[in-house]
């Protein structure tokens, strides 16, 4: 593209024009042939890189312009393409950005920037009447690529020429914020980014009943406001950081409007099938637990179970957990989940390994509270348990004890052994689906007795979460919500292993869902045990609730924050629970947990 560069304004205009035309050609081919994602992105990156090089050469800027320009051009072309979903929005956007470039060019005495801005504004303003008609014209990929390419290349040229980035990037802020937040949220939820959806803020606004023109005008008004902030800050001569801060705030307000109007983000990632009935395990005087199989025997919990079983007079078969994959939407459909588990090749292999076994312990799974919800998570925590219980029934296993998580009940004030679940993250969702699969199989009347054990916040020597807890307890961040006497769901892997073996061996009647017993610690005592020489700070409860609320609000945009907010909430407020299996009303502090945390 450097071949088209001429000295002065014409050369810079040519770079913007040729880049926009090249990207429009890519869009035209995509409209005709529906290019796959990889070659389409490759073409965009190639054009963006060549354009960025031309910008650097034409303006004499340093090499940093090349990567910046390539990312800006490639990213913004896709942003305009994603945002071109309602009548009028792109035409008005091109007009307001062009007008902003005109003002920016006038402010910094840069004629070519004002000229390019005027061309942009005139071209897309002329397109608006056609675009607003119900049966009118649409930009399509060719038009949106042309718009994004022209705007991003002009912005790259301006920055390379020394124009304040605040002035030229401000009008792009709303489009970038809507696109970036939507893509990040979908990625965190484990959704396929390239699949069709309606979770952009502007789409959610139309879902609340606003017309296309109203939403397009609203988005344009916020873009104009963002540009006005940059212009006022530049004219006032104050720090550009003030302008950036105000623009970020404006973007946050824009992203919040759909919720204010009643739009709620789709919760398809956390759909849980209706609960089957919980089968009570009757007293079984003839139950013998001599031969055990532990799936996931090399894992954190599995190895603790094997170690405890080794002290008993039993046979142990240690089984490596197969790696399975399944999408969240498929796992959310119980019939599809069980159907896939039924035809899963690993079912037959597991059934063969379970032959002659009395008790199967499923200690496998992904303990990833911050996981983005990928196929591996749902394969390990939903599909594998279904395959294990079906294989156990095939092999004639007498009993299966499945390790689930109390996280399936979410933020409820009191944990219990009911079938009620309220998953708040991909991890807790996947574990809840695993529970549902086992309960559904038990409800069919299979001879294998099914017990679901909900583990709480399990700690153990060498576990990364335990080491992080101990480091936190020794840091200035160690704190609890006053007065710090709320019960904590923190527990020891030692007692968890004992509970697993007890449930697998007992001849008494047992409920189909069992909650791991509380180990007697309060929120304050957990931190004191982990750092005996340091007292945790007592924070006002209202302040803690405010911070936690902000964390969960951020999680609505980036779901990964939900897991962090939940851990902080549990540290500050704890979580009470009904008495666990074989647990009385009086509970003393667990010596096992005290030892693990380093207090003894």
Image (spheres, rainbow, N blue to C red):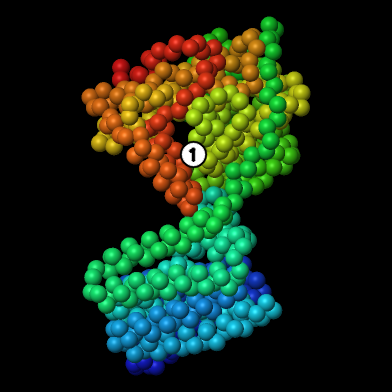
Residue 285 visible in this rendered orientation of the protein: yes
Q: Nearer the viewer, residue 446 or 174?
A: 174
Residue at horizontal 60 percent and vertical 16 percent from the top = 504
Q: Is residue 278 above or below residue 173?
A: above
Residue 53 visible in this rendered orientation of the protein: no
Residue at horizontal 58 percent and vertical 12 percent from the top = 314
* Residue 497 screen position, x and y as percent: 50, 19
Residue at horizontal 54 percent and vertical 12 percent from the top = 582
Find the residue positioned furthest to the top: 285
Q: Nearer the viewer, residue 145 or 110?
A: 110
| Quarter occupied by the C terminus | top left
* Residue 203 screen position, x and y as percent: 58, 63
Residue 24, image quadrant: bottom right
Q: Is residue 500 left or right of residue 597?
A: right
Q: How many marks?
A: 1
Label 1 sits on a secondary structure element that is loop
Find the residue positioned furthest to the right: 445
* Residue 146 screen position, x and y as percent: 53, 80
* Label 1 sits on residue: 368
Q: Is residue 163 above or below residue 599?
A: below
* Residue 457 screen position, x and y as percent: 45, 28
Residue at horizontal 37 percent and vertical 26 percent from the top = 523
């Amino acid at each position: 593209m450097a071949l088209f560069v001429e000295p002065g304004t014409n050369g810079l205009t040519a770079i913007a024009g040729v880049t926009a035309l090249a990207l429009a050609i890519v869009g035209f081919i995509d409209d005709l042939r529906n290019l796959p994602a990889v070659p389409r992105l490759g073409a965009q990156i190639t054009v963006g890189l060549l354009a960025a090089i031309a910008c650097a050469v034409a303006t004499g800027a340093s090499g940093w312009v090349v990567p910046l320009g390539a990312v800006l051009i490639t990213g913004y072309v896709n942003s305009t393409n994603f945002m071109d979903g309602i009548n009028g929005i792109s035409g008005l956007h091109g007009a307001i950005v062009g007008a902003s470039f005109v003002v920016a060019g006038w402010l910094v005495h840069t004629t070519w920037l004002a000229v390019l801005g005027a061309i942009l504004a005139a071209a897309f303003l002329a397109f608006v009447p056609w675009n607003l008609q119900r049966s009118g014209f649409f930009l399509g990929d060719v038009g949106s690529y042309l718009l994004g390419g022209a705007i991003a290349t002009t912005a790259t040229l301006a920055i390379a020429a020394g124009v304040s980035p605040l002035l030229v990037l401000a009008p792009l802020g709303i489009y970038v914020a809507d696109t970036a937040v939507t893509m990040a949220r979908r990625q965190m939820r484990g959704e396929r980014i390239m699949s069709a959806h309606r979770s952009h803020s502007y789409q959610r606004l139309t879902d609340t009943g606003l017309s296309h023109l109203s939403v397009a005008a609203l988005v344009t008004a916020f873009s104009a406001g963002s540009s006005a902030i940059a212009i006022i800050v530049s004219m006032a001569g104050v720090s550009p950081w003030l302008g950036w801060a105000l623009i970020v705030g404006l973007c946050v307000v824009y992203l919040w409007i759909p919720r204010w109007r009643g739009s709620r983000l789709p919760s398809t990632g956390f759909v849980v099938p209706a609960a089957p009935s919980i089968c009570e395990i009757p007293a079984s005087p003839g139950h013998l637990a001599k031969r055990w199989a532990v799936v996931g025997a090399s894992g954190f919990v599995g190895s603790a179970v094997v170690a405890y079983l080794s002290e008993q007079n039993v046979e142990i078969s240690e089984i490596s957990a197969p790696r399975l994959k399944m999408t969240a939407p498929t796992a959310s459909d119980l019939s599809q989940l069980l159907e896939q588990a039924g035809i899963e090749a690993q079912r037959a292999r597991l059934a063969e390994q379970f032959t002659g076994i009395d008790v199967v312990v499923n200690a496998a799974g992904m303990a990833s509270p911050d996981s983005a919800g990928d196929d591996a998570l749902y394969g390990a925590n939903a599909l594998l348990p279904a395959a294990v219980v079906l294989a156990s029934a095939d092999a004639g296993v007498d009993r299966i004890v499945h390790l689930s998580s109390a996280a399936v009940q979410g933020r409820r004030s009191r944990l219990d052994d009911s079938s009620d679940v309220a998953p708040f993250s991909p991890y807790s969702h996947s574990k809840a689906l695993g529970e549902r699969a086992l309960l559904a199989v038990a409800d069919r009347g299979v001879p294998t007795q099914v017990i679901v054990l909900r583990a709480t916040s399990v700690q153990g020597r060498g576990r990364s979460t335990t080491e992080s807890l101990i480091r936190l307890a020794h840091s200035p961040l160690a704190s609890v919500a006053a007065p710090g006497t709320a019960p904590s769901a923190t527990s020891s892997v030692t007692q968890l292993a004992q509970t697993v073996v007890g449930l697998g061996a007992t001849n008494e009647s047992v409920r189909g869902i069992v909650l791991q017993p509380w180990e007697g610690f309060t929120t304050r005592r957990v931190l004191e045990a982990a750092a005996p020489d340091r007292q945790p700070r007592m924070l006002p409860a209202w302040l803690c609730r405010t911070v936690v609320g902000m964390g969960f609000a951020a999680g609505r945009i980036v779901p990964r924050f939900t897991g962090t907010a939940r851990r902080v909430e549990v540290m500050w407020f704890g979580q009470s629970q009904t008495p666990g299996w074989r647990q009385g009303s009086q509970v003393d502090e667990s010596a096992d947990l005290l030892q693990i945390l380093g207090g003894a």
